[in-house]
Image: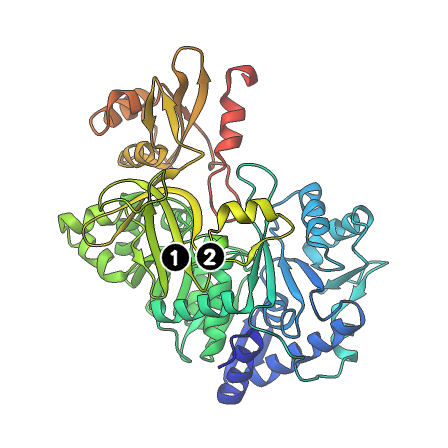
Amino acid sequence: MTETIAAILDRAELLYADNTAAIDGDTRRTYRELANDVYRLDSALDAITPTQGGVVGLLALNSYTHLLAWLGVPRSGRVLNALNTRLSTAELSFILDDSGASTLIVDDAFADQGAELALSCPKLRTVVHTGSLPTPDGMTSLEKLLGDARPRAALPVAESDIAGVFYTGGTTGLPKGVMLSHRNLVTNAKHALLLWGFDEADRYLHAAPMFHLADGAATLALTWVGGAHVVVPAFDPSSWCETVTRHRVTRATLVPTMINRLLVSECLAETDLSSLRSIAYGGSAMPRALITKAMDYIPCSWGQVFGMTECSGIATFLDHEDHRRALDGESDALVRLGSAGRPAIGVEVAIRGVDGSLVKTGATGEIVIRSSTVMVGYLDRADETASALDENGWYRTGDIGRFDDAGYLYVVDRLKDMIITGGENVYTAEVEAALLEHPSVFEAAVFGIPHSDWGESVHAAIVLFPNHTTEVEEIIQHARTLIARYKVPRELHVIDGELPKSAAGKILRRELRDRFAPSSR
């Protein structure tokens, strides 16, 4: 088949026209109706955005509009720029200008921000509003655009054409636009189908952000097989539980913070979750105690995904059998619960040393990935693209990792996050894993602070589970039983709430370094 996003919906309309395609509050659509809406969106955009390479930004909570945008914007050669809703107006302005977006779609929640962006982004010509509130002055109503448009067939698109530009979280500086082609995204959706086995009986709950590629993989995969998209605006434990029960949801994706909020909520014990077939998680390290508790409370299949924007989302997967064996107490499985799993079918993963050669099993080095899902490159950043992609198609992730004898990948650290203290290398992920072994620690982030004698001093910030009041010294003593003394944090900072994160769930260590550096205290 043609490796384009248009082909995914065309198949769904042909085979599953009368199946429920989307449930968003009072909005219900069959695949026939979804296809008609997508075709009209594609047609309506003709008047305001060029078909070949025109960029359309989307700033909205989870909604049916997100589904339309994922399927409709790239259909005839346009480029989707799904925006992180947690960013400031200044950050969004940079991204819209950098991507060259000429059109921005906003919902009620971001209408005011959309008006600000219209003034600050010279390339932005049209702001389209969708929602139940009146369309603000100076904006165009999406509902009116769709109502006035006539559906048309998709225009020719090459598999190598860019379908989306997705911006990295900016954990180490300004965000970069990752260009993903139709082939990249379609192949990644195939990987999702192989890993989860979606079928037309599935109902997938969009509670994690729909602008994120982890959810995007499920969006395309589920559409391919005619399953139903169930949408809530954002994650909330009560809403999540109520929606699972009411709509008999079968699949979901969560990040560790969401899982913890579910486990400490009162609604979970009162909810019928028997319809759930599987839950995928990822985005940040999951404490072993948290995932085993979650498997006890929600007895469905569990799977962990490791990936990054540059490879369309999915690189490795720790499957349900690995989780089940860990829950049964098998020692090797308990260790591997701390891994990122094994490479997904269709993805090559290797470990390379400083000289670029492959290292032996068990040795650490940089994780490199090769697949049809690896990005085309960074938008307008030729030097950074050349640094990240070699001539043989390998993507240098910047992560340090190792494989065990059974092919399980362990992510040890980010190259830029490794701490050198007193001439010794300290891998932050190793220290974080030791801290997370303490039963009171829910989240942990380890980072280096400049030190006049040692070069860098090891610091950590932690978040405790609710109702835990463990002393800092107890946690440090616990860490000393698991790792060498030079790796143990010199200072441990307890934070209320949660650690600062990007929308992808990655901890923003740069913010923690700035917060706890001596000059800032």
Q: Position of residue 208 (x, y in %)?
A: 49, 57
What residue do we see at 39% from left, 57% from top? 315
- Circle 1 sits in a helix, a strand or a loop, which is it? loop
Q: Position of residue 480 (x, y in %)?
A: 23, 24
* Amino acid type of the residue that numbered disc 2 sits on in the rendered structure: Cys
Q: Residue at x 19, y 54 (%)?
A: 406
Q: CA distance from mark 2 to mark 1?
A: 7 Å
- Mark yes or no: residue 168 visible: no
Q: Which residue is mark 2?
A: 311
Tell whether 229 sits left or right of 302.
right
List x then y, in percent, for residue 323. 24, 56
Amino acid type, label 1: Ala
Query: Is residue 403 in sight in this rendering?
Result: yes
Residue 138 is marked as none
Identify the residue at image location x=36%, y=18%: 490
Towards the viewer: 53 or 277: 53
Q: Is residue 470 above or below residue 137?
A: above
Q: Residues within 10 Å of mark 1 (few under 14, many from 20)?
A: many
* Total number of numbered discs in the rendering: 2
Circles 2 and 1: CB atoms closer than 8 Å: yes
* Residue occupying image coordinates x 47% and y 54%: 391
The answer to which of 72 and 174 lies nearer the viewer is 174
| Disc marking residue 315 | 1
Q: Position of residue 123 (x, y in %)?
A: 79, 54
